[in-house]
Image (tube, helix red, strand yellow):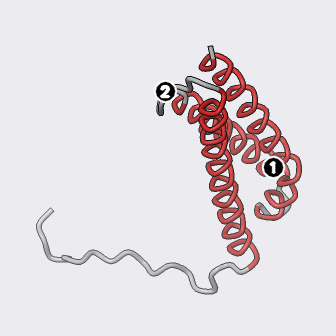
Amino acid sequence: MYTVYSYAAYLLISIVLTVWVGRTLYRRGRVFVVDAFRGNEQIADSVNHLLIVGFYLVNIGLVALAMKYGDKPRDVTAALEWLSTKIGLVLVVLGVLHFFNVLTLARMRRKALYPSPLPPPPLVDPLPNRPR
């Protein structure tokens, strides 16, 4: 019986945390996405929406897959340890995904603010005399 209650608590806590973090990132991160796209709000909103959909897919997919792994809790102590391990994994993944989203936005912003001063070099055929 501990297994069923542990699974229910795990799903509830994990999905609530994922949705809370996702909504916070979506609302508060919009300013950064708009800035990264040089004020183009239509593209920024579209990219922001795609980011949140991917965020939800990865996190909820991980939550679903992680349920299978590990020993099943057989008493209250094991259930709490199992639950803390699973929730901890979800929190670490949320943090890592958040870090990579922020890193990506920072790189996009840097490219928008400081475009490359030189155009890319022209493509040169390395073997100009080869038969075609």
Q: Quadrant of the N terminus?
A: top right
- Determine the image quadrant of residue 103: bottom right
- Say which residue appears at 83% left-offset and 41% top-offset: 23
The relative height of residue 74 versus residue 85 in the rendered view (above or below) is above
Per the image, label 2 sits on a secondary structure element best described as: loop
Q: Depth check: 116 or 31 in front?
A: 31
The relative height of residue 92 versus residue 62 in the rendered view (above or below) is below
Q: Residues within 10 Å of mark 2 (few under 14, many from 20)?
A: few
Q: Depth check: 113 or 100 in front?
A: 100
The location of residue 34, given as percent across then percent down, is 83, 58
Residue extending farthest to the bottom is 117
- Residue denoted by label 2: 68
The location of residue 49, given as percent across then percent down, is 75, 41
The relative height of residue 72 versus residue 27 in the rendered view (above or below) is above
Q: Residues within 10 Å of mark 1 (few under 14, many from 20)?
A: some
Per the image, label 1 sits on a secondary structure element best described as: helix
- Residue denoted by label 1: 25
C-alpha span from label 2 to label 1: 28 Å
Number of residue marks: 2
The amino acid pointed to by label 2 is Lys
- Determine the image quadrant of residue 89: top right
